[in-house]
Image (spheres, rainbow, N blue to C red):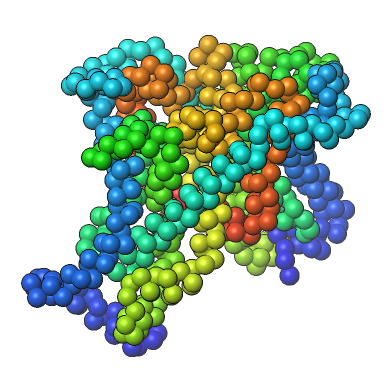
Amino acid sequence: MDRGFFSNVELRTPGGRLYYTIAVIALLVVAALSLFPFFFAFTSGLKDSTEIFAGGLNLFPALPRWENYGRAWTLFEMPRLFGNSFVIVGVGVVLRLLVSSAAAFSLSKLKPFGGRVISLGFMLTLLIPSIAYFVPLYTTIAKLPIVNISLLNSYWGLWLPYCVDAFSIFVLKTFFDRIPSDLIDSARVDGANALHMLMYIVIPLSRSILVVLAVLAFVGLWKDFLLPYLVLTDPYTQPITVRLFYIADDYSVNLQMAASFMALLPPLVIAILLQRYMKIGLTLGGVKG
Amino acid sequence: MNAPYALDTEQATTAKKHRQPIKLSSLRAALPRQLTAYLFLLPALLLFALFAWLPILSSIQMSFQNVQLGGTPTWAGLDNFELMLRDPVFGTAWKNSLEFASWSLLLGYFVPVVIAILVREMRHGKAFFRIVYFLPTVVPAAVSVIIWRFIYDPDGGVLNELLAQFGIARQLWLQDVALAKPALVVVMTWAGFGTTALIYLASLQDVSQELFEAAELDGATPFQRIIHISLPHLYPVMSLMFVLQVIAVVQVFTEPFLLTNGGPGRETLTPAMNIYNRAFIRMDMGYASAWSVSMILVLLVFSLIYRYVNSKLMANTD
């Protein structure tokens, strides 16, 4: 039987009912506040450009102008912006997981000399705020040392820094540590090399945690602003978050709202469809500290 | 206890105690395995070196140098730090940071705790509340500021229209010296409270139901059960969330950068924004790095104080 600090019997008493009603109302009010900006952007996007500045609390437009969404879609060149974002974030997520899985597999199962020192080095990046070394990070991207290549205005200037994620490495290492060494050893006896072990034993057994990390990475990278803002100066390559902010002021507010609402949809849909994985990911984040 | 396992661990510990010095022959045998191990680590090592470790070191190095974009760096000793401490912006930015942190704790610290306790008690619709509170978290700040800018709009903005219904005068939310900070903190709280509430909720699910039953039998009122069972269970997570919230607020950049650009005046200028301004607008990388180092130091000192206080508290409860 599920119970909290109230037992189910107590909840049926008048006092319990009163408490429960108040709690539900309070939670619904918070839910309304939480959803209000989404709702507001959606309905403001349906108004015409004078109606939107009319006084009073006219949350619902008298005559919804659905064509605003079509106009915003073409004026803001949404297909290209969405495309850019999906390429940047999609490849970023895949590369991050590849690099992190390989590193975590090595630390967990291949026992490299100095593994503990390397782990400490990874850990260090979690303790130092990234904004504190953002300036030299930018100069590195602008001119890679030794090879002297500039990654400005190239997606590699985002993909490569996006691979640096100690959190994924540690979560994966903890997960890989739980895979019995016997399994790895027997594969080794059967003549499997390290790559086979990673691809056919470790990764298939860790599919669930990889999905969790992929969802977290997707949402996180989709939100990123400062790095793409500085690295990509060519409007044709910018992701939706950067470009939308640049050009928003060029159009009327109702179109801004329509475009913003559409821009919110991909992370919202992912969060709703994959909420089971996001929930696990959050508790991972809380434990990380 | 399981005897064979106990024997195993005993052997393992004695083996560790008398560790043999590494022999050349065993090293040669281990070499191929070490090579593979490092091959798998190589991409991560290279990328961490390029995009994290070297930038961290060079940030510290540049803080002692005179670096203009394009020019060759020259040694500047402590000049950057001296300049920073004499800069009136230094006091302003950190004071703003402190005020942001206070506002965010005031508006947002207890809200997730209360929400988690209330949601835990729901018999229906838990999943609904979980997802609804979580949705703002996934929204990119660069998009949400476009919406919030219009909510706060002095003419026609929905917030002023709502207040007008109650006869409250229009406010310049983002331009008013007294209102700009709390207005920004509301946006940040909206974007972040759901995550924290879900972490508390996950922690509350671990409280054993027998505990509540026992308390009920002993005559504890529901309110006493919250105070003596639910809340103490949350204390460790709450203390962690306190630190994480302060650290996040000290680093805040995107919201003030896009919503107020530090204004009105310098009311919402944060240290992170000043690093950006100095480095990318005035192109003075050395001076910006001195600020970066000061930020690392402040957060380090804060974490150390927290750990010290926390260990004292832990020692007292034991």
Where, quadrant-wise, is the C terminus of chain B in this rendering? bottom left
Q: Residue furthest right?
A: A62
Residue B102: x and y in percent read 54, 28
- For the residue pair A19 and A56, the one nearer the viewer reads as A56
Instruction: Tell me: residue A130, above or below residue A93.
Output: above
Instruction: Tell me: residue B217, above or below residue A39.
Output: below
Where residue B156 sits, quadrant-wise, is top right
A57 to the left or right of B145: right
The structure residue drawn at horizontal position 57% and vertical position 20%, both measured from the top left corner, is: B260
Residue B190 visible from this viewpoint: no
Instruction: Tell me: residue A57, above or below residue B112.
Output: above
Residue B127: x and y in percent read 72, 56
Instruction: Tell me: residue A203, above or below residue A96.
Output: below
Where residue B10 sits, quadrant-wise, is bottom left
The structure residue drawn at horizontal position 54% and vertical position 30%, both measured from the top left corner, is: A235
Residue B172: x and y in percent read 68, 14
The structure residue drawn at horizontal position 40% and vertical position 22%, both measured from the top left corner, is: B280
B35 to the left or right of B311: left
